[in-house]
Amino acid sequence: MTKFLSADYWNERYINNASQWDLGVVSPPLKNYIDQLENKDIAILIPGAGNSYEAVYLMEQGFTNITVIDIAPIVIQQLQQQYPDQKNIRFIETNFFNWNGEYDLVLEQTFFCAIDPVLRSNYVKHMASLLKPNGKLVGPLFNRTFEAGPPFGGDKESYLKLFESHFNFQTFTPCHNSIAPRANTELFFIATPLAPADLNNESCPIPK
């Protein structure tokens, strides 16, 4: 197992407060997206959610079916202790690649950048399997590189090539509302899974 999928590795990082990309608040691009959602009962998954600012914001806005998964036991334990009687949200300790379910919406918030880049194709394939036919994968991705990771960065061209085997993009554009330290370094995307009949079709619509 790559160390970036190790529970011990992430536990230590959270204990030592070493996750530099933790914003401390809900991500502005995702907050704006959440604010325009009308159906509060959709099934939502947030993988590798860490301190779960987005999940807590969803809960506060009245969403009723939220699942948070993370591989770090300390993160899940703290969230379960903080919200012991909350019925609209589940905090589950597990490896993303071992998790199954069907969701209307998956929110991507610094999980993709946290896994070893050699596993990105696995991420894409498994993420598509977690979404309902009309489900959406939504969130920001770093539009920059890092000297060492995690986080691991990338650019639009590499992301398009990676995702096109399993997803169509409805939106893929530079973030206009990133938090100040990330200004001009994020891309916001909305993607839907390809229909099974289209999975081997090389002509995947990609926005310019």
Image (cartoon, grey):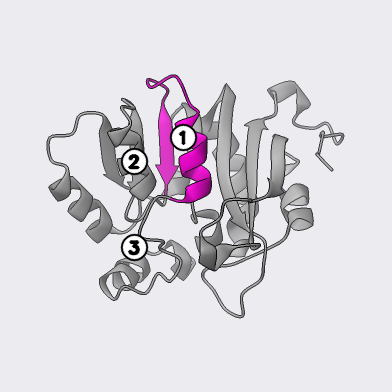
9 w.r.t. 99: above or below? below
Q: Position of residue 154 (x, y in %)?
A: 68, 63
Which badge, 2 or 3, comes first in the chain's sequence? 3
Tell me if label 1 and label 2 are in contact, CB under 8 Å.
Answer: yes
Which badge, 3 or 1, comes first in the chain's sequence? 3
Q: Mark 1 points at which residue?
A: 34
Q: Residue at left 75%, top 41%? A: 164
- Asked where in the image residue 142 lies, by quadrant, the reply is bottom right
Judge left or right: residue 25 versus residue 110: left
Q: Residue at left 83%, top 31%? A: 201
Q: Position of residue 176 (x, y in %)?
A: 63, 51
Q: Residue at left 36%, top 70%? A: 9
Q: Name the residue under label 3.
A: 7
Mark 3 vs mark 1, CA separation in Å: 29 Å
Q: What stretch is highlighted in magenta?
A: 27-47
Seen from the viewer's position, the closer of residues 146 and 35 is 35
**Amino acid marked by disc 2:** Tyr
Tell me if label 3 and label 1 are in contact, CB under 8 Å.
Answer: no
**Amino acid marked by disc 1:** Ile
Which element carries disc 3, helix, strand or loop?
Answer: helix
Whether residue 60 is visible: yes
167 w.r.t. 63: above or below? below
160 w.r.t. 119: above or below? above
Judge left or right: residue 79 versus residue 24: left
